[in-house]
């Protein structure tokens, strides 16, 4: 795990060119992984991509897809969210939303094997509002030169997808950089939490204090169900974009300050202290294809 200092970030990332250079660095890492996969995709036409919440799995999958298609391989991304089991109303209060037990592992494993063998499957769908799984009516049959990415937090768990290792590539995306500010060391989880806050405000109508409230449960789920399998990955990528704290300072610091006035919880106070050490930068300077657009929106 590498470490970067907030003073370096403040000085190094000021202009739009500075930000673009950092995005290009990350894009180059993704491109390198995609090229290696493209060379061996006949033997391994499926990629299992895992990572904790807020790691940027969705955007990383889309970027891998784009690079593979640039190499001449049509690629499809399938979200493991669609393999969640139906949750009945009486279960909602007690269900562990991070547990792999939520997955229909039998169906998922069957579909991965059939997709590898170019056998047609009907993909399922999951409605997060009703918490019901249902047949989507969407049929899919992989062509021989096609690559499929299965993306989700449990993608590397062999109890969830139980197939031979030599049939798939495995990839882990996560924030692996710690940040030092005035002799304080901030764990990468704070970056992932800020990402979740931004995304939840934008797309899920969830207030900041609610996102923070559930974050301990999310972290516990990562420790128990995701992190133990990251060493299975053929490729690991650090999705930290070095200038992103400066963007969150602009977008979230004022809102967090208001919450901190009424909430003495340690996580809230740590986030406020963390962002206080950064200069802000306008989100409009962030490239449209930057990974952090997943968390701050397209505009």
Image: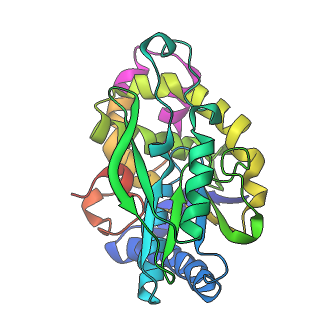
Report x, y in % for residue 64.
Answer: 49, 73
Q: Which quarter of the figure has residue 75?
A: bottom left
Report x, y in % for residue 285.
Answer: 28, 66
Q: Which quarter of the figure has residue 7?
A: bottom right
Locate the N terminus by quadrant: bottom right
Locate the C terminus by quadrant: bottom left
Q: Is residue 138 visible?
A: yes
In the image, residue 161 sits, relative to residue 77, either above or below, namely above
Q: Nearer the viewer, residue 263 or 165?
A: 165
In the image, residue 156 sits, relative to residue 16, either above or below, namely above
- Magenta stretch prevailing secondary structure: helix
Residue 65 sits inside the magenta stretch: no
Residue name at image x 51 percent, y 56 percent: 57
Q: Nearer the viewer, residue 201 or 276?
A: 201
Report x, y in % for residue 111.
Answer: 55, 56
In the image, residue 79 sits, relative to residue 226, either above or below, namely below
Q: Which residues are magenta?
A: 257-276
Residue name at image x 39 percent, y 75 percent: 20
Q: Is residue 181 visible?
A: no
């Amino acid at each position: 795990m590498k470490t970067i200092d907030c003073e370096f970030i403040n000085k190094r990332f000021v202009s739009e060119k500075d930000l673009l250079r950092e995005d290009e660095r990350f894009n180059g890492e993704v491109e390198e992984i995609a090229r290696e996969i493209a060379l061996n995709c006949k033997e391994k036409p499926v990629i299992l991509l895992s990572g904790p919440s807020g790691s940027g799995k969705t955007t990383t999958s889309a970027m891998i897809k784009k690079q593979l298609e640039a190499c001449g391989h049509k690629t499809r991304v399938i979200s493991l969210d669609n393999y969640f089991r139906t949750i009945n109303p009486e279960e909602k209060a007690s269900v562990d939303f991070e547990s792999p037990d939520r997955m229909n592992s039998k169906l998922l494993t069957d579909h991965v094997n059939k997709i590898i063998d170019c056998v047609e499957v009907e993909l399922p769908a999951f409605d997060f509002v009703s918490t019901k799984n249902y047949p989507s009516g969407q049929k899919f049959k992989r062509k021989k030169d096609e690559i499929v990415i299965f993306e989700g937090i449990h993608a590397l768990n062999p109890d969830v997808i139980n197939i031979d290792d030599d049939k798939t590539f495995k990839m882990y995306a996560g924030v692996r950089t710690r940040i030092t500010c005035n002799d304080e060391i901030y764990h990468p989880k704070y970056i992932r939490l800020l990402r979740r806050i931004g995304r939840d405000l934008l797309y899920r109508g969830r207030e900041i204090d609610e996102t923070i409230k559930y974050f301990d449960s999310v972290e516990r789920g990562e420790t128990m169900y995701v992190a133990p399998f990251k060493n299975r990955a053929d490729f690991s990528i650090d999705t930290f974009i070095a200038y992103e704290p400066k963007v969150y300072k602009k977008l979230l610091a004022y809102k967090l300050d208001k919450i901190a006035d009424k909430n003495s919880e340690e996580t809230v106070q740590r986030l406020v202290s963390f962002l206080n050490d950064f200069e802000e930068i306008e989100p409009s300077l962030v490239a449209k294809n930057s990974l952090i657009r997943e968390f701050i929106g397209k505009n």
